[in-house]
Every structure is written in C-alpha cells, then in structure tokens.
Image: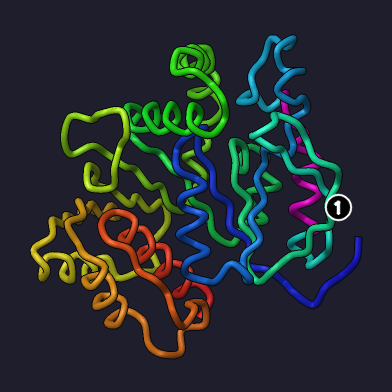
Amino acid sequence: MTDTEIRPFLIGMGGDSGCGKKTMSDNLASLVGEENLLVISMDAYHKWDREEMKSQTITHLNPECNHLDLALDHVKQFKAGKTVWKVIYDHATGKFTEPQKTEPRKFVLIMGLHPFHLKEQRELFDFTIFLSPDEDIRKRWKIYRDVKKRGYTPDEVVKILAQRKPDSVGYIKAQEQYADLVINYFALKDLKDKVEDKHMGVSFIYHEDPKADLKLIRKLFEDRDCYAALQGSTLTLTGGNTKKDVQEMADVLFDDHSCILRKDVKWKPGVSGICQLLLALELDRRIC
C-alpha cells in the first residue's frame, strides 16, 4: 500500500438494500465533483458471490457473511491516505472482479449494509448518514431496481425481502442509532410500482447538533410556499421546490468561497434537491 498526500474527509453511509444509497452518493458527487469523491461499496466485502450464497443458510445482512475486519483495515488505510488493492462486487454478474488499484480522494464515501457495525470503524468517520425510507418505499425501490438491473423477478425479490426481514431489523436498522444524520423518506400518496420524487417527503433527523441553521432553512422553504416543519432537531420537508428555488436558497446559504462545492453544481428539484442542499450544508459547515 502506497501513501498519497491526501488526507480524506471520510463519510459513512448505511442503510438496507434498496434504501437509496446509490442515489445519495450521486447527489454527493454532484456537489463535490466525481473527481473528488471515491465511493466504496461494502458489497465488495461479502464472503460469497451470488452463486455461492445459494448454499448458505445466512444472508448478506448478517455480519458473519462479510469480511468486516478486512473492510475495517481498508477504511483505516484510506483514512491515512493510502492506496488499496481491492475487489468490486459486480451486481450485473453476481461475481467479484480481480483486485483493482484504488486511490483515496478528497472525500471517501464508505457505503453499505454494515458501515457502523464495528465500533472501531464508526470512530473513523468524520460524518455518518443512515438512510431509512418507510418500508413500503424501500420495497418498491428494491423491486424496481433488482428487476430492471439485476435480473430478478418481482416474486423473487419479495421472497428475498421476507427471508431477510429478521436480519434487516436485527443488524441493519439497529445501526441507525450510530448515525449523525438519519434521512427518512415517506410517501405523500398511495404508491404505484415506481416511486417518483414528487410522491415523497423527507425528514432529516439529527442525532447530534446540526451544523446547518435549521430555522433559516425552514424559513427559506416557507417563503417559497413549500411545506416545512421543525420539531427539535428534526426538519421535515415535502418538496414542491423547483431547481430555481434550490439555487436561490443555495445562494443565500453559501458564499462564493465554499471549500467543498464545485463551481457549477446542478441543483435538482423536489426531494433530490432538498437532499443536495442539506448534505452540502452539513459538509460545508464541518469542513470550511
């Protein structure tokens, strides 16, 4: 393992399968630039590939099904600015790649099922997020993704969800307590097969004092006739905001010398734009 001059800002993001981790990582990349973000999926630390899993009696959600000690070692190396050789789990084939040279960048995002399972790993992160959509939303997201991109049938996905339910509650949901920020998506109407941004609201639940000024954010949304509620350290918003709304709010909240935002951020409408804005604020206030 070789040293680099980079000492990354390390972000941990946890949540169950199909909870929106890839979408949130894309939001993060849109803020800081793909060239500044290394995304590490902890699926790479599964002990068995898809075919081998068929003979196992435990699921990937069980920590014993994963090389978590190896993951911890790699997180330590990234934190220290070292280059790591590691495999990637290819969901299209259900197999692992050959080891690849992986160099840290300004931001390193470690995301997966078990980022907060080990206390030693939790303590390495500079900021931690747990994605906790309402279960009906997650179920629909997972069915849509696994059928479209991973070759499963809807019935197979429903069966897998049922089999994994005890591990989901016992091992994944239990990690929510360790996150600095929990993001909960909830439905605004009866859902159809595909859950769209406009069908959701989102709550940001802070387990430590937020770095962002939540009262100001609430006012900015209310000034644009968007629903906003603040109860303690929980901010709830229901979208309705346009890209222009998010851009205008960003102009108020960030100066021209923000040390994390790329110069040409493409802000999004609705819940995606809300997540961009709140995520950017937390990072900006922690780093700059």
Provide residue 131's location: percent of width, then percent of height.
44, 43
In the rendered image, the vertical position of residue 222 relative to residue 192, given as above or below: below
Drawn side of residue 245 relative to residue 112, left or right: left
> Which one is in front, 182 or 34?
34
Quadrant containing the N terminus in the rendered view: bottom right
Q: Residue at x 41, y 47 (%)?
A: 182
The chief SS type of the magenta part is: helix
Drawn side of residue 9 relative to residue 55, left or right: left
Colour option used: rainbow
Q: Residue furthest toward the right?
A: 1
> Which one is in front, 93 or 126?
93
Provide residue 233's location: percent of width, then percent of height.
30, 55
> Which one is in front, 283 or 144?
144
Q: Label 1, on which residue? A: 85
Provide residue 133's location: percent of width, then percent of height.
36, 37
210 is within the stretch colored magenta: no
- Circle 1 — which element? strand
In the rendered image, the vertical position of residue 147 relative to residue 8, given as above or below: above
Q: Quick one: label 1, few (<14), some, or many (20+) residues within 10 Å?
A: few
Q: Residue at x 63, y 51 (%)?
A: 110
In the rendered image, the vertical position of residue 98 relative to residue 273, given as above or below: above
Q: Residue furthest toward the bottom?
A: 256
* Number of numbered discs visible in the structure rendering: 1
Amino acid found under the numbered disc labelled 1: Trp
Tell me which segment is drawn in magenta: 65-77
Drawn side of residue 258 relative to residue 229, left or right: right
Q: Residue at x 46, y 83 (%)?
A: 263
75 is within the stretch colored magenta: yes
Provide residue 141's location: percent of width, then percent of height.
40, 33
